Image (tube, rainbow, N blue to C red):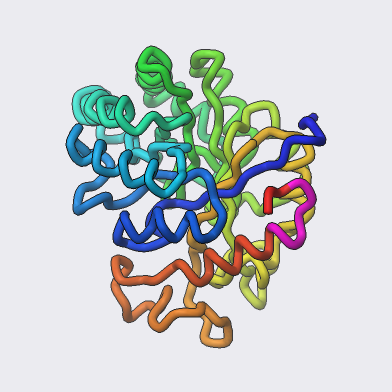
Amino acid sequence: MSDPNTEVELTALSGMGSRDFDLAVDQFARWGLRWIDVWGTIYGKSVAELDAATAGRAAAAIERAGLRAYCLSTLVFNEHVERGEEVFRTEHLGTLDRTLEAAAVLKPRYVRLIAGKLDGAGAGSTVPRLKREHPWVAEVYREAARRIVDAGFIPTMENEVHDCFLAQPRDFVDFVDWVGPPDQFRITWDIQNAWQMGAPPTLDAYRTLRPLIGYVHTKGGRAADDDPTRLEWNVGLDAASWPVVEIIQAVVDDGVSPVICLNPSHGTWRADYDYGAPGAFHPDVPFEQWDMSKVTEKDLHFLRAHIKGIRK
């Protein structure tokens, strides 16, 4: 259980404040946040492309705004395992090593890995298939986690969408048991990503994952009008159809994620929902031009108003 005198903090992916990194850190400060998840594009470079100079510029901006980096959100291992061990070792571990040089400048608490892709994932248990068809996966993930720990950071792995080999709660547990990562290793549970992969958000799912969780990503999302189990609509937390308050309150009460990170919702743009900015999430507007700040601000207000123990 968490210390009742310790409040859980909120953060968001950096691009949700603004696509301009300097404007983003200023927006985070105005929102009263103290942490930032470094994600997306930073001064024209992806996280994988960050060099020491660009990382130093970002670190200076973060410090100027009175923030600290909580996670460096890499896309390491965001790849189909069918591409083979050599791709994961040469390309992805190489990217991780370069990224850890940027992490040494930014000094985040976590460095994120991605749970990889497996053709047909989501249709059943994935770990037996990985063991049988791609047994090298365990060692590659264990090696990545070791490198992050050796560099002085906490390794975390997030579940994604589109063939992600982590979907059902049991998949997470079985995968970690198989890999045997360093003790510091923690799961980043993206609640909506799991839903999109076929595991609707429930308190039972959370309780299964609770011993593994170190970081929680949350976003809205509404089920299809004709199927309460299927994610269809992109909406904020205020209009979400999953049990937001019950699950996030449990996360806060248990103290498993001292910082909770807001993400942009997946799903179809909905004409009757107020996104707060022209073109935000609209299918005719390129992703790079979406203004996610207004929905992010609404989500911050929602969590601060409805979850006890969230720092205001």
> Which percent across, then down, holds residue 113?
40, 33
Q: Nearer the viewer, residue 129 or 206?
A: 206
Q: Position of residue 274 (x, y in %)?
A: 55, 82
Residue located at (62% from left, 50% from top): 199
Magenta residues?
304-309
Q: Position of residue 69 (x, y in %)?
A: 43, 38
Residue drawn where x is 46% and y is 25% of the image: 155
- Residue 194 makes an appearance in the image: no
Instruction: Classify residue 240 as left or right of residue 22.
Output: right
The quadrant the C terminus occupies is bottom right
> Picture quarter containing residue 210?
top right
Residue 128 or residue 8, whichever sits in front:
8
Frontmost residue, 266 versus 80:
266
Is residue 254 highlighted in magenta? Answer: no
**Direction from residue 258 to residue 20 in the image, left or right:** left
Q: Residue at x 65, y 64 (%)?
A: 301
Instruction: Check the image and report above or below for 249 versus 99.
Output: below
Q: Is residue 288 above or below residue 125?
A: below
Q: At which x and y percent is residue 266?
A: 49, 63
